[in-house]
Image (cartoon, rainbow, N blue to C red):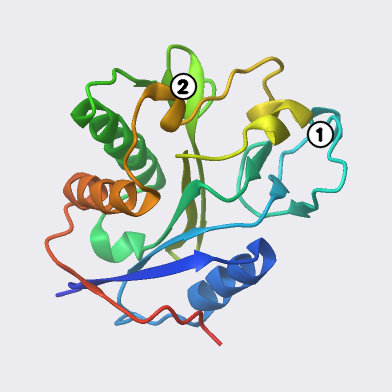
């Protein structure tokens, strides 16, 4: 079955709950011929708590809202200046499993950073990508009816202070960094395009096309 091209949607700044609900609607309503999509966006400040999240890892959220979500993992933070990429893929149709998609996301970030002459690595005990032990990208995926949603977040140029209000991904004292602190001056839009190209390579996506920035009704 031909399931290309994949659709790319750039949304800008979107309320987290709005995007979360839209991902679930898309996944519930998709059929066997629904094109796969990748959404690129940012969120206003929000903490998201995974299904396995423990309250003790949420230290002092203050005025920042906390949203319970249906991905795995613990608590993380999203905010402006962080690139969020949601992968809405039919895994059965693509012939891939969850672990393969997670590995593809990790490797895409690692290759992106390598292009900037930065060495990074993934960790088995705490999914994500790390530079000198500090987390620069977080991962989380959910699969329902063979469709994936959620994805990855890459810290580009943001206020990192809210990470001090949590134990990031359930790890006390885990350091967090971002591309700007690592000497990368490219805009978030430029980073988004480069990451998209790496994701396409890792996932074997042969073609994609831009689609309107319209969330599913």
From the viewer's perspective, is residue 14 above or below residue 196? Answer: below
Q: Quadrant of residue 183?
A: top left
Q: Nearer the viewer, residue 8 or 126?
A: 8
Q: Nearer the viewer, residue 175 or 152?
A: 175
Quadrant of the drawing holding the C terminus: bottom right
Marks 1 and 2: which is nearer the front?
1
State the separation of the CA atoms marked 1 and 2.
22 Å
Does any portion of residue 122 appear in the rendered image? Answer: no
Q: Which mark is residue 18?
A: none
Q: Residue at (64%, 30%) from the top-left corner?
A: 169
The reply, left or right, for residue 199 in relation to residue 99 is: left
Q: Which residue is tagged 2?
A: 124
Secondary structure, mark 1, is loop
Q: Earlier in the sequence, mark 1 or mark 2?
A: 1
Q: Residue at (26%, 48%) from the top-left corner?
A: 199
Q: Residue at (36%, 35%) from the top-left corner?
A: 106
Q: Residues within 10 Å of mark 1 (few under 14, many from 20)?
A: many
The reply, left or right, for residue 134 in relation to residue 109 is: right
Residue 25 spot, x, y in % from top left: 57, 77
Q: Which mark is residue 58?
A: 1
Q: Nearer the viewer, residue 190 or 165?
A: 190
The reply, left or right, for residue 154 in relation to residue 93 is: right
Residue 17 spot, x, y in % from top left: 68, 66
């Amino acid at each position: 079955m031909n399931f290309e091209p994949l659709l790319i949607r750039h949304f800008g700044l979107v309320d987290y709950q709005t995007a979360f609900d839209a991902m679930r609607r898309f996944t519930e309503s998709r059929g066997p011929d629904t094109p796969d999509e990748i959404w690129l966006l940012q969120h206003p400040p929000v903490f998201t708590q995974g299904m396995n999240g423990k309250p003790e890892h949420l230290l002092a959220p203050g005025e920042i809202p906390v949203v319970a979500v249906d991905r795995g993992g613990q608590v993380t933070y999203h905010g402006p200046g962080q690139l969020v990429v949601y992968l809405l893929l039919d895994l059965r149709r693509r012939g891939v499993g969850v672990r393969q998609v997670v590995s593809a996301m990790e490797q895409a970030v690692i290759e992106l950073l390598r292009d900037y002459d930065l060495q990074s690595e993934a960790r088995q005990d705490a999914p994500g990508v790390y530079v000198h032990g500090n987390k620069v990208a977080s991962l989380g995926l959910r699969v329902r009816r063979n469709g994936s949603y959620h994805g990855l977040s890459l810290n580009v140029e943001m206020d990192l202070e809210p990470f001090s209000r949590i134990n990031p991904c359930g790890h006390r004292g885990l350091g967090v960094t971002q591309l700007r602190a690592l000497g990368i001056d490219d805009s978030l839009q430029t980073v988004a395009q480069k990451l998209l190209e790496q994701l396409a390579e890792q996932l074997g996506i042969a073609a994609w096309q831009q689609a309107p920035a319209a969330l599913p009704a």
